[in-house]
Image (cartoon, grey):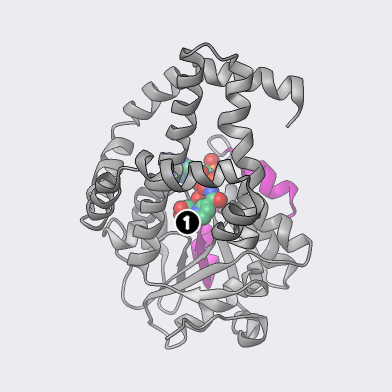
Amino acid sequence: MQEKIYRDEDVDLSVLNGKTLAVIGYGIQGKAQALNSRDSGCTVIVGTRPAAESRSRAQAEADGFEVYSYAEAVKKADVLLIELADPAQPAVYAEDIAPNLRPGQTLCFCHGFNVLYGAIQPPKDVNTVLFVPNAPGAFVREKYLKGEGIYGCVGVDHDATGNALEVALAISKAVGSTRAGVVELSFQHETEGDNYEEQILYGGVIHLMKLCFQTMVDNGYAPSFAYAKSIRSLRSVIDVMDENGIEDYISTRSSRTCEFAVRTRGPRVINEDAVREIFAETEKGLFARDWMQEWQLGMPQIHRMRRTAAESTMEKTGKEWRERFGV
Ligand SMILES: NC(=O)c1ccc[n+]([C@@H]2O[C@H](COP(=O)([O-])OP(=O)(O)OC[C@H]3O[C@@H](n4cnc5c(N)ncnc54)[C@H](OP(=O)(O)O)[C@@H]3O)[C@@H](O)[C@H]2O)c1
């Protein structure tokens, strides 16, 4: 059976009438969701860290929101949109959110990670739901302003009030996602699907681009040409594939040489065992365990890798390339 797709006409925004939405964290997603919900007619306040620590408090104030501490915002709100960086959520939840929750409130997460892995365990007298627009925050805002929306998903982990799904759907409508379509997903599939995709697709493609570049440079190609081949050529075809399908692109829009290359050599590049292994590790929670440990230690691997990567030939070439040929 096909999944139900919720669109504007299926969702009642009035579930949020008379309710105050507190957007906890005014970062990449928080800002977009706060602005969109307010423009949809909701009453929205914002919770951030104290001014001395916060990178976004001044921006939230400049955007015209009433801004409070995390704890104050929780007390004033009926619906909490938890838009904090995922690894920061457990500590903020324990110190500022949990002690101030009251029965009947809704905790709406934008990623199921902390609930799925038990780092946050909300009480049973509040709704625990999920709403995730499938795009970076800036795009969520840009589309909304054009009268469009971003495909998204909602999920219910615990229904305390009997209408938790309706509340999650109303939030998705306020942010603009039901303009495109919203589907229901479990916290498990949202979290593991997201973590899996980031490892395989983002991880795989980015490392393939780097290897493609390095191999050409090692074999005497001009770095600028190798850069254009390794990044720019992908950019020009990804929208075509999304709009028309992969087969249509390969068989009617690419050259026959390209079609032959894709069909016969592409599979050799893929390590299917590694992909399946990473899927299994993700399902067992091993990726989550490693990431939480990395965050708790202050991200040593990431800091080390960032330093090396920022100094790489590819990054330097990319900077020059963008200056010479434009974005
Ligand atoms: N990035 C996306 O477009 C995207 C897409 C889909 C889902 N999501 C989900 O949306 C949620 C928010 O992600 P995001 O990318 O928008 O987050 P983000 O911009 O990286 O961070 C959001 C806020 O978290 C606060 N914060 C960071 N570290 C903190 C700490 N140690 N203690 C207390 N507060 C801290 C910051 O507050 P201050 O500004 O006050 O410093 C920041 O504004 C996550 O659950 C994420 O998985 C994000």
Could you tell me if residue 26 is visible in this image?
no
Q: Is residue 47 magenta?
A: no
Residue at 57 percent across and 81 percent down: it is 6
Q: Residue furthest right?
A: 146
State the residue in front, 137 or 95: 137
Could you tell me if residue 105 is visible in this image?
yes
Where residue 280 sits, quadrant-wise, is bottom left
Q: Work out which quarter of the rendered image holds the N terminus and state it.
A: bottom left
Residue 262 horizontal/vertical position (percent)? 49, 45
User: How many numbered marks, from 0 up?
Assistant: 1
Establish if 77 lies above or below 275. below
Judge left or right: residue 289 versus residue 103: left
Judge left or right: residue 255 versus residue 189: right
Q: Which residues, given as a range, are shown in magenta?
A: 55-83
Residue 17 horizontal/vertical position (percent)? 65, 81
State the residue in front, 313 or 67: 313
Residue denoted by label 1: 71
Instruction: Say which amino acid is labelled 1.
Output: Ala
Q: Residues within 10 Å of mark 1 (few under 14, many from 20)?
A: many
Q: Work out which quarter of the rendered image holds the C terminus and state it.
A: top right
Q: SS of the residue at dot 1?
A: helix
Residue 16 horizontal/vertical position (percent)? 61, 79
Where residue 322 sits, quadrant-wise, is top right
